Image: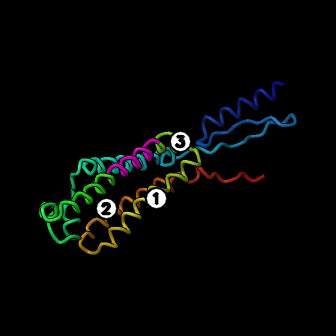
Amino acid sequence: MKQETNRNQNVREHQSNDSAVGQVIKTEGQLKMSTIRVERIYEKYAWVIIAALGALIMVGGIPHTLGVNSDPTTPESIIGMGLNEFEVSNPMFFDLYDFYFRAGGWSDMGFAFYVIVISATAYRKGEKWAWYILWSVPAFLLGHAAITMSIGPSIAHLIPFLAVFVTLSLLGLLLPVRRFFPKEPNA
């Protein structure tokens, strides 16, 4: 009995001195050490990257919901005239543009809200379903990039920003991949 107590004490000392945390398992009267994976800091806080991107998407959607275009050169380059001139010359088409512009802002804000909530709760806890769902962030950003590139060189200045955001979203998803898909221990 004293030998088993000493062995338990040695295991606890080893656990406190080692960066890998272990768990003692008693099977068939023998003590065995089972290692538990220690989470790296970049795995633990990768959710912050995704939540920050969600916050940026939300901040970008706010002016759109109010009908304020923070980059009027984009629609002006597409229609070939200023927005004020467009509103005067074609009020019904301008109303259609304004409707879709504001609705897009509300969609962006709704998407961003869910990204923030999921990343700060389920993704942060390491729930696998959240990892799959949050792949919608790079898909959303790549969709914006595809639309931007289809319009032409007049709004190509947006591509570097979208590339940075896509890269950040991929980092936020791929850095903690071992947390969601741990390697199986050798049996």
Task: Please indicate whether residue 102 sits to the left or right of residue 24 in the image.
Answer: left
Marks 3 and 2, how far apart in space?
28 Å
Marks 2 and 1, how far apart in space?
14 Å
Q: Which residue is mark 3?
A: 122
- Which three-letter amino acid code belongs to the residue tagged 3? Ala
Q: Which residue is mark 1?
A: 170
Q: Earlier in the sequence, mark 3 or mark 1?
A: 3
41 shown above or below 142: above
- Which three-letter amino acid code belongs to the residue tagged 1? Leu
9 shown above or below 155: above
SS for callout 3 = helix
Task: Please indicate whether residue 148 sits to the left or right of residue 42 in the image.
Answer: left
Question: What quarter of the picture does the N terminus occupy?
Answer: top right
Is there CB contact under 8 Å for labels 3 and 2?
no
User: Few, some or many C-alpha atoms within 10 Å of disc 1 (few <14, some 14-19, many ≥20)?
Assistant: some
Task: Please indicate whether residue 151 sits to the left or right of residue 50 in the image.
Answer: left
Q: Which mark is residue 73?
A: none
4 shown above or below 43: above
Residue located at (19% from left, 67% from top): 76
Q: Nearer the viewer, residue 104 or 98?
A: 98
User: Few, some or many C-alpha atoms within 10 Å of disc 2 (few <14, some 14-19, many ≥20)?
Assistant: few
Q: Earlier in the sequence, mark 3 or mark 2?
A: 3
Q: For the magenta stretch, what is the residue range?
A: 105-117
Image quadrant in which you'd find residue 3? top right
Q: Nearer the viewer, residue 25 or 63?
A: 63
Is there CB contact under 8 Å for labels 3 and 1?
no
- Which three-letter amino acid code belongs to the residue tagged 2? Phe
Residue located at (23% from left, 72% from top): 154
Q: Is residue 115 magenta?
A: yes
Q: Which residue is mark 2?
A: 161
